[in-house]
Amino acid sequence: MSSATPTPTSVRRLPVVGALRLGRPSDVWFKPALSVVAAVAPPSLLLVALGRLDVAAFTMAGSLCALYAHHRPYAARAKVLAWVVLGMLGGLAVALVTASLTRNAVVLVTVGALLAAVQKAVCDATRVGPPAHVILTFVSSATLFVPQTLGQVPGHLALAAGAGAWAWLVGMAPAPLRPHGPERRATAQALYAAAAYAETARGGEGSAGARSAAYAAVHAAWQTLLPARNRPSTTRRALERLVVRAEVALAAPADTDPALLRAWADAVRGSGRVPRTGDPRRDDAGPRGRDGGGCSEGDGLRRDDGSLRRDELVGVAAERAVAPRPLWSRLGPLAPLAVRTALGCALAGHVSLALGADRPYWALVTAASLYQANLTLTWSRAVQRVVGNLVGVLIFAAVTPVARLGPLALVLCILACNFGAEALISRNYWLGSVCVTPLALLVTELPGYQPTGELVTDRVVDTLVGALVGFAAALAVTDRRAGRRVERALTAVDRARERAARLTADPAATPAALEAARRGLAAAVVDLRATADAAAGEWWQRALPQERVVLAEQAAHRTLAATVRRQGLLPDPGTTSTQTHTEDTSP
């Protein structure tokens, strides 16, 4: 490992245009977009029929839970959605009780800021998102400023709980039709990313970025597949074997056929049978991948002689046996973010109050939405939020005449904004905010219409206050421990690499030990890259050991390649079988 002196951090250029650049839409953008419409529409339309649209904000709080967990397998999704609904109800209950006990705006803003900090920390620690804590913070903060009595609290919570239960059903509805849809998508993304890296590695241009993206995609696929700890289905095991092939491609891109990986990915994305992957240690395995033949949920896991190829998945079983890290250990590194959120939201809300705002929670929620993994990303989110909100208030002014045609028209406009926000936000946050802003303004009109000019002015002022004050709080609360987390990640990679190298050199090493060591090293490399990227975007800290990070990654990738060859998943360099295998398994 190099002991070179870390290079000092260069002067930072704050991105503006780059922060607004549009990306590709998510592959499943339509799922949250359709789900939120399906979750919001029935309760809202029922209230329209009953003439009680004044309480629609409470049902909408529960309905918005349908935005969560679309990337998770259905067994895990059921638990996550249930916890999201409970978390939403918990924040809502605190807000309702507080609002019924006091009308002191300073107290209300302070409670809202503390709730936002707790929601931010818990959502980041449990990786609940997108949309993470922002929806929960919007619900609890807005409710703090709705006049309440203690007697009304149970009824309003019941409305939210009923809509939350409906949102849970909406989120789980696709399970009978495509029970392994999330796992298939994650596996396909891993295969596509591995194919892209194999091509860039051969060309020699941009391979480092493609490699990091590919390892992250493979790691995400394992995070989707591994939660099935008890007797995973045969389809899931077939998908695991495909992710193993993606891992092999990352370790030895020169021996990889990108076209074959993409063919597998295309087949997995569909609803047909999971394709055969073949066994790279057998010369007669190639035609099965070549002819494009699929496999049923059982026959794709067997050799021609019928014996199970368990050695490729023993590491998966070993990893399933490892208990997840306790929540408290994951909350510790998030302390600076939680403090930023609490301070920034409180200051933003209080400044808004000082300026005479009637809805200081708009400034509070704006500040809460800014805080990302580091200051550079927080700045980008501030730019996106301001631009999106300013455009959004213009759209609100344009649609207001239509929304005020009647209660049904108002609900339909809200549904359109919900759909548009989820359809566009994956391309860039500011584009989604263009629809989120009129949505938030329309929700304020559910109890009754209000002057358009006043709403627009208040929203613009609160957006600017929330962005400026919130970012100032982020500058004041620095994350001094970012460098230490990089050092710990480097140590973890070194240890994992040494273990993998030791087992690779040991002729008596078992397949389970080799597979577990390889998987552990790959996960450590992904964590190192994520930690280094997050720390690199943090300001006011000592220079980071960038050269050590790069050297550690390179050494780890060499060890991964050696481990793959030791397992027999690829032939040794220089043998003629490499070329034969590539030719035999190409589509």
Image (cartoon, rainbow, N blue to C red):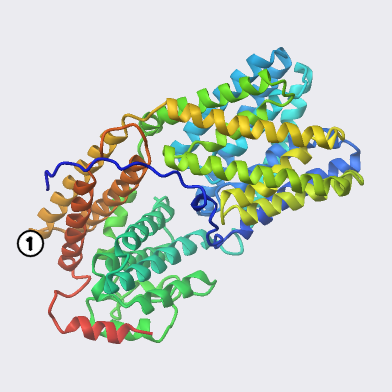
Percent of width and height locating residue 456: 76, 37
Determine which quarter of the picture holds residue 10: top left
Q: Badge 1 is on which residue?
A: 507
| Left or right of 334, for residue 156 | right
Image position of 484 with respect to 21: above or below: above
| Left or right of 473, for residue 537 | left
Percent of width and height locating residue 583: 28, 86
Percent of width and height locating residue 548: 19, 47
In the image, what residue type sits under mark 1? Pro
- Specify whether residue 154 is in view: yes
- Specify whether residue 85 is in view: no
Please tell me which residue is depicted at 90% across the width and 39% down the height of the picture.
50
Determine which quarter of the picture holds residue 489: top left
On-image quarter of the C terminus: bottom left
| Count of residue discs | 1
Q: Nearer the viewer, residue 162 or 397?
A: 397
Image position of 289 with respect to 400: above or below: below
Secondary structure beneath disc 1? Answer: loop
Please tell me which residue is depicted at 75% across the width and 17% down the height of the picture.
150
